[in-house]
Image (cartoon, rainbow, N blue to C red):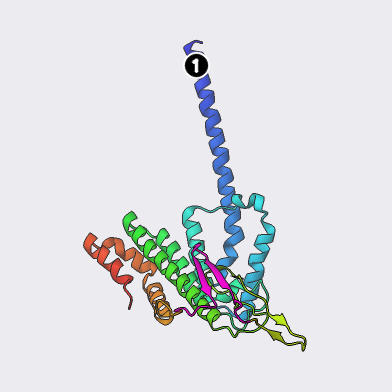
Amino acid sequence: MNKKRIFSVVILGLAALCAVFFYWHTQRQANYAKTRELFAPIYEYSGRLTAEEQKRFSEFTDSIMGEVEPSVARKYALPKRERLQLEVHSMTLHRNNPELLFIGHGSLPADTDVDPYIRHFSILALIAKTKLADLPANSRKSIISHLETLGKRLTKNSVEMYIQEVKNLPFRPRQELPTMRFGIASAGTRGRDQWVLEADGSLVFPEGARRGIVHITDTYGNEYTVDLDTPTDTSITESTTELYAEIDWVFERLTAAELRRLPTLDKAEHSATIQKLFQSE
């Protein structure tokens, strides 16, 4: 093969490669445009929504789920920064309106505790905001680690409160566990003996029978067991009120402005500021 032919093959190969890249880039930009158009209405909702606005928002998000087939969902992508911006807005919106999480499942049960969900969405919003910020890698990693630790503490606190509810259940036939709460993946009773139906129609729990063990798994995969026949310490590891206040405190102070300010500090002050931010107040 002479040099001229080799040169022609190389040129044709480069031209084909450029054509493929141009097509791929064009298609990607077109998909970005479709995704921006699809999600743009989300930014019309912010702050504390009225009941009607919550309903419209829920219907809008449901319509997106119905419109986008799982097989083509991966095409509806956004550039990383825009995706994180959308995540910050969405998580903040859910923080301000935790009821949105339940709207699609009927009316919100009267005994639903939305407080842990408010703090959960606060943490998720802050993590996305931190990923979006122009921070040194070590600082970003440190802040996210602190936030993830808050998330784990929040889940543990919620599980411990649930355990207290389980231990305080009145003992009676056909006893059901309390309604599932934030942070719990599963809960069920094992090894429970049955009540006996007497001739007079009454139900009697046999002497020596066992109420059983409640097995609980949280969303991190941690397992807890509650022996209903053995008195156990069910105290809360840390004050729920103080934990919520700490998360609220961080949410109010880790603003976009603060994240822009952090890189301007010298290394020692930078580290000290982050540590102070996550000190319990």
Numbered disc total: 1
Q: Position of residue 211 (x, y in %)?
A: 59, 77
Residue 44 or 127: which is nearer the viewer?
127
Asked if residue 230 is among those painted magenta in the image, a careful observer would answer yes
Residue placed at 34% from the left, 64% from the top?
260
Label 1 residue SS:
helix
**Amino acid marked by disc 1:** Ile
Residue that label 1 marks: 6
Asked if residue 90 is among those painted magenta in the image, a careful observer would answer no
Horizontal side of 143 relative to 22 (left or right) equals left
Residue 203 or 72: which is nearer the viewer?
203
Task: Tell me if mark 1 has few (under 14), some (14-19) or many (20+) residues whose alpha carbon lies within 10 angstroms of its own.
Answer: few
Read off the magenta span: 207-233
Q: Quadrant of residue 19?
A: top right
From this view, report whether residue 135 is shown above or below residue 204.
Answer: above
Q: Position of residue 247 (x, y in %)?
A: 41, 74
Horizontal side of 241 relative to 177 (left or right) equals left
Horizontal side of 66 relative to 116 (left or right) equals right
Quarter that holds the C terminus: bottom left
Q: Quadrant of residue 204?
A: bottom right
Q: Position of residue 182 (x, y in %)?
A: 53, 72
Residue placed at 44% from the left, 67% from the top?
152
Residue placed at 60% from the left, 49% from the top?
75
Horizontal side of 40 relative to 265 (left or right) equals right
